Amino acid sequence: MHAIKIVALPLGPFQVFTYILACRKTGDGAIIDPAGDPPAILVALARENVTPRMILNTHGHPDHVLANAALKAELDVPVWMHAEDNGLYADAPDVAEIEQQTGLSVDTTADRMFSDGERIVLG
């Protein structure tokens, strides 16, 4: 059995894949690219018995961060973004339009910046 559990969820209006990664031993996990539908992500976390420790965004396109604000508020976990992508994340030109279309707030605040080569440890 692999030490890491990976769950893929196509979510949101753009059917972007959100991933849940978790340590099978501890249940500690990360939500990667929460693309929308926060309730579906919460259901998957409970079903898989995962305790999220962070939200990781692979890049700053708004369709990959749609559930950041809701999940951060619900789960009290930090949002991580690569330092070199933060400009795109914070200044995406189509954020207002996407928020209007989806009814979700695009949170453009990363709590933690990471850099190339940095190790992220779960479990």
Image: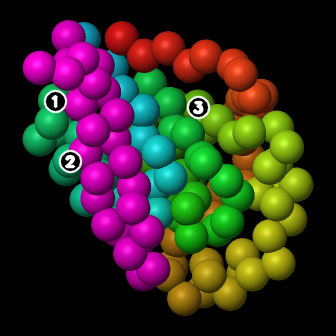
Q: Name the amino acid, label 2.
A: Ala
What numbered label is drawn on residue 44?
2
* Whether residue 36 is visible: no
For marks 3 and 2, give the CA distance: 19 Å
* x 42%, y 41%: residue: 31
Where are the magenta residues, as a range?
A: 1-25
Please tell me the numbered disc located at residue 49: 1
Residue 119 is situated, as x and y percent measured from the top left of the image, at: 61, 16
Q: Quadrant of residue 100?
A: bottom right
Q: Is residue 117 above or below residue 43?
A: above
Give the spatial CA distance, label 2 vs label 1: 8 Å
Which residue is pictured at 27% across the width and 38% down the height? 6
Crowd around label 3: few <14 · some 14–19 · many ≥20 (10 Å): some
Dominant SS of magenta comes to strand
Mark 3 is on which residue type?
Answer: Pro
Screen quadrant of the C terminus = top left
Q: Position of residue 41 (x, y in %)?
A: 30, 52
Callout 3: SS: loop
Between disc 2 and disc 1, whose residue precedes? 2
One can see residue 19 in this view: yes
- Tell whether label 2 touches label 3 (CB within 8 Å): no
Quadrant the N terminus occupies: top left
Does 33 sit left or right of 37 as displayed?
right
Instruction: Give, as a three-letter code, the residue at label 1.
Output: Asn
Give the residue at mark 3.
78
